[in-house]
C-alpha cells in the first residue's frame, strides 16, 4: 500500500520551543492516526482524525487533518523534555482489517 | 494490568534456531495484529486475526513465519530457521471490533536478536 511520508525525520529543539511534524500522502486518506513512541518503548495512540479539515487539541498538542484529506500535522506548543520520542502518523486503509500503515516517523529531541 | 502483554521481552538466538513469541491481547478485543519494527523505522504490518481466524498476511511474512490464535485469545508467532535479517522488535497490538474505532493498543514488544 501507499506509504505515508513524514517530515522532518529528526528535530532537535530547546525546551519551550514549538515543534511540528507533517504527514503527507499522495492519495486521499479515510482517516489518520497519530502515535508516540518513547525511546525503548512501544507506540501509544494519541488521536484519530477522520473529517476533512478536522482540528483536535490535547493540552499542548494540536492535530490537523487537511481539507483534501491528504495531509496531517501535529504541533506541540512549548515542548517539554517529556515530549521526547518518535511521532508516527498511521493510516488505516479502507477494508475489514483496520491494519495500520505507519509513516516514517519524526524523532523529537528536546534539550533542557 | 489489563494491557497487551508479550513474552519474552528479549530473545537472543543463534541463526537457524526456531523461536516462538506469545501475545496476550486486551481480553475484550477481537482484533489482534502482529507488526515488525526495525531501528529507525515505523512498525510494519505482518498479520491480522479476527478472533481465531487469520484474515490477512503481509508479503513480509515468509513461509518461515507462522502465527496462530487457537482460541481467539492469546496468539503465538513462530519463526523457523531464523536468519540475521529477522532481528527486529516484534510488536503485538489489539483493538476492539467497533468499526469506527481503529485505535491499536500495543504491547511492549519482543526484541529478537539473531546472532
Image: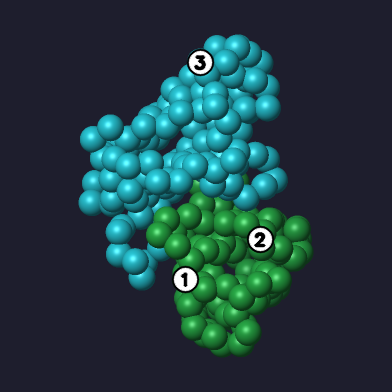
Q: Residue at x 36, y 70 (%)?
A: B100
Labelled pair 3, 2 in contact (Cβ < 8 Å): no
Pick whichever, B111 or A95, lies toward us: A95
Closest to the camera, between mark 3 and mark 2, is: 2
Q: Which chain is cyan?
A: B
Q: Position of residue A76 (x, y in %)?
A: 61, 73
Of the residues under marks 1 and 2, which one precedes in the sequence?
2
SS assignment at label 3: loop
Q: Give the spatial CA distance, label 3 vs label 2.
A: 32 Å
Chain letter of the residue carrying label 3: B
Relative side of A54 to A87, left or right: left
- Viewport quadrant of the C terminus of chain A: bottom right
Give the camera-side residue of A95 and B86: A95
Chain letter of the residue beneath label 1 in the structure image? A
Nearer the camera: disc 1 or disc 2: 2
Mark 3 highlights which residue? B18
Q: Which residue is mark 2?
A: A2
Numbered tag placed on residue A48 in the rendering: 1
**Image quadrant containing the N terminus of chain A:** bottom right
Query: Is disc 1 placed on a helix, strand or loop?
Result: strand
Q: Nearer the viewer, residue B88 or B2?
A: B88
| Circle on res. B93 | none
Amino acid at each position: 500500500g501507499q506509504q505515508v511520508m513524514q517530515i522532518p525525520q529528526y528535530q532537535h529543539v530547546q525546551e519551550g520551543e514549538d515543534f511540528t511534524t507533517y504527514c503527507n500522502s499522495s492519495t486521499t486518506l479515510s482517516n489518520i492516526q497519530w502515535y508516540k513512541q518513547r525511546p525503548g518503548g512501544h507506540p501509544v495512540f494519541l488521536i484519530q482524525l477522520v473529517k476533512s479539515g478536522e482540528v483536535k487539541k490535547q493540552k499542548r498538542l494540536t492535530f490537523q487533518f487537511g481539507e483534501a484529506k491528504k495531509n496531517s500535522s501535529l504541533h506541540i506548543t512549548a515542548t517539554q523534555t517529556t515530549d521526547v520520542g518518535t511521532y508516527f502518523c498511521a493510516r488505516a486503509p479502507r477494508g475489514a482489517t483496520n491494519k495500520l500503515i505507519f509513516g516514517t516517523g519524526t524523532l523529537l529531541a528536546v534539550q533542557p | 494490568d489489563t494491557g497487551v502483554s508479550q513474552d519474552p521481552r528479549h530473545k537472543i538466538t543463534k541463526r537457524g534456531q526456531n523461536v516462538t513469541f506469545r501475545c496476550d491481547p486486551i481480553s475484550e478485543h477481537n482484533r489482534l495484529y502482529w507488526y515488525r519494527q526495525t531501528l529507525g523505522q515505523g512498525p510494519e504490518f505482518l498479520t491480522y486475526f479476527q478472533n481465531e481466524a487469520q484474515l490477512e498476511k503481509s508479503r513480509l511474512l515468509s513461509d518461515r513465519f507462522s502465527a496462530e490464535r487457537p482460541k481467539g485469545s492469546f496468539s503465538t508467532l513462530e519463526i523457523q530457521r531464523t536468519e540475521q535479517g529477522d532481528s527486529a522488535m516484534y510488536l503485538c497490538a489489539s483493538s476492539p471490533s467497533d468499526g469506527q474505532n481503529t485505535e491499536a493498543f500495543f504491547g511492549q514488544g519482543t526484541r529478537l536478536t539473531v546472532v
